[in-house]
Amino acid sequence: MHGMKRFTGDAAAAAKAAHETAEKVRKYKALLEVCARKNSAHTYDLEGLESTAKLLSINAECYTMWNYRRRAIDALYPPPPPPSTSPAPSPAPSPS
């Protein structure tokens, strides 16, 4: 390609780099599989949150997993109920 330097390094170094890249891809695919399985099963748990955190730290543009993460957080940590709008009962008069 234009402007790209040719690799003139050691073949062993190239093989090591290829092996490291293949290992990263394998880990990414395994994480993606776990997250996708939980997403399709609508399973929202802490393991799913941890898996999506790892996955999204590798690839932040995986929007399906952001949506799964949002639903998992909503399921695990529901918002508190709104405060009651009815007036508070007045205190009973003290006997004097």
Image (tube, helix red, strand yellow):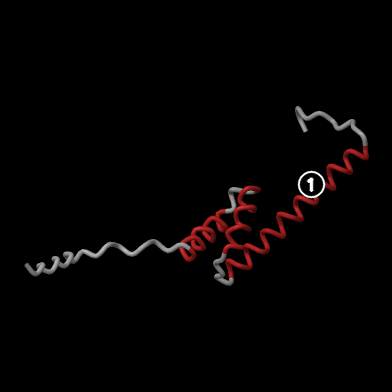
Spot the residue most to the bottom: 41
Residue drawn at x 89%, y 30% as measured from the top left: 8
Is 3 above or below relative to 88? Answer: above
Q: Position of residue 52 (x, y in %)?
A: 60, 56
- Residue nearer the viewer, 35 or 77: 77
Q: Position of residue 71 (x, y in %)?
A: 49, 62
- On screen, residue 59 versus residue 83, left or right, reads right
Residue drawn at x 61%, y 57% as measured from the top left: 50
Q: Secondary structure at mark 1?
A: helix
- Residue nearer the viewer, 35 or 95: 95
Q: Amino acid at mark 1?
A: Thr
Which quarter of the rendering shows the N terminus?
top right
Name the residue that disc number 1 marks. 21
Q: Position of residue 74 (x, y in %)?
A: 46, 62
- Residue nearer the viewer, 71 or 83: 83
- On screen, residue 90 versus residue 38, left or right, reads left
- On screen, residue 89 versus residue 55, left or right, reads left
Question: Which quadrant of the view contains residue 93?
Answer: bottom left
Spot the residue most to the right: 11
- On screen, residue 50 versus residue 75, left or right, reads right
Residue drawn at x 81%, y 28% as measured from the top left: 5
Q: Position of residue 62 (x, y in %)?
A: 59, 53
Residue drawn at x 49%, y 64% as measured from the top left: 76
Is 86 above or below relative to 7? Answer: below
Is 66 above or below relative to 39? Answer: above
